[in-house]
């Protein structure tokens, strides 16, 4: 079954160009010209990934992202015509997984989408490798589900990848640079504040298990077992 991409963009030409690239890559594509249209479509059609412009009429991208995150962990790539770091961080705080700054190559956007839709954490797993368990924390790599003290926790794609990478490297200090390369790839142009925002969101959601992700000053992060 084909995966479905929702492209939310008020610039007709740019929306059509991106649509053509995704169609050529074998995806089904839905289009929305503004934020309100996007929310209505998302609530009525199953979508696998959202490409979301920030500056739009009726409802901006931040508001749409926040609305989607109330009910879904679907991967979200935000598009911005501004390189303002605060805009990017706000998007991540609201639950976006990645961002692309205009102008950009549609090939770059397609590559970012493919990364989010193809999770290295869950590929070719044997039954005994499908779970990561650490006392009160359980991660199912196949279903991308997480439980804290037996209760389900909803993580975004990127939060899930960060958690599983740290857990697989338990007791090893992982630098921010290592996280960027392994989660986003070499072409990512984010910085330490981007990583900090995702870690903060992840800790908030992990509740009682948040302290298992240790900050190692001037070095990075480390996942440790609870006493």
Image (cartoon, rainbow, N blue to C red):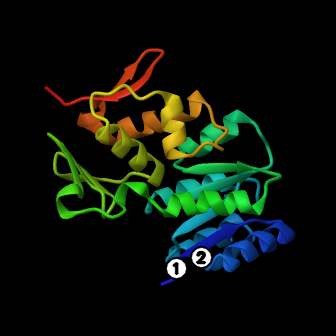
Whole-number angstrom distance, CA of label 1 to CA of label 2 = 5 Å
Q: Are marks 1 and 2 in contact (CB under 8 Å)?
A: yes
Q: Residues within 10 Å of mark 1 (few under 14, many from 20)?
A: few
> In x, y percent, where is residue 49?
55, 66
**Residue for badge 2:** 41
> Which residue is depicted at the point 16% across and 51% down?
150
> Which is nearer the eye, 167 or 50?
167
Q: What is the residue that sits farthest to the bottom in this orientation?
A: 1
Q: Residue at x 60, y 78 (%)?
A: 27
Q: Is residue 158 above or below residue 28?
A: above
At a point 43% along the width and 62% down the height, the residue shown is 71
Q: Which residue is mark 1?
A: 44
Residue 200 image-quadrant placement? top left
Q: Residue at x 86, y 70 (%)?
A: 13
> Quick check: can you spot residue 57?
no
Judged left or right of residue 209, residue 120 is right
Q: Is residue 127 above or below residue 205?
A: below
Q: Hey, which quadrant is residue 22 in on the image? A: bottom right
């Amino acid at each position: 079954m084909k995966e479905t991409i929702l492209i939310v963009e008020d610039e007709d030409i740019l929306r059509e160009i991106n649509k053509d690239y995704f169609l050529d890559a074998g995806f089904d594509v839905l289009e929305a010209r503004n934020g309100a249209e996007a929310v209505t479509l998302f609530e009525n059609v199953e979508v696998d990934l959202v490409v979301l412009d920030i500056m739009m009429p009726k409802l901006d991208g931040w508001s749409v992202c926040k609305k989607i995150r109330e009910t879904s962990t679907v991967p979200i790539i935000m598009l911005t015509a501004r390189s303002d770091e605060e805009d990017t961080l706000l998007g991540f705080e609201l639950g976006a997984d990645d961002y692309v700054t205009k102008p950009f190559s549609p090939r770059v956007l397609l590559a970012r989408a493919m990364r989010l839709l193809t999770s290295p954490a869950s590929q070719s797993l044997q039954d005994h490798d499908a779970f990561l368990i650490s006392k009160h924390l359980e991660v199912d790599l196949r279903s991308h589900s997480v439980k804290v003290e037996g209760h389900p926790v909803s993580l975004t794609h990127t939060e899930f990848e960060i958690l599983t990478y740290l857990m697989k490297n338990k007791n090893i200090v992982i630098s921010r640079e290592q996280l960027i390369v392994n989660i986003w790839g070499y072409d990512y142009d984010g910085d330490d504040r981007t990583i900090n925002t995702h870690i903060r969101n992840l800790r908030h959601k992990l509740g009682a298990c948040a302290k298992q992700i240790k900050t190692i000053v001037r070095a990075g992060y480390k996942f440790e077992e609870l006493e």
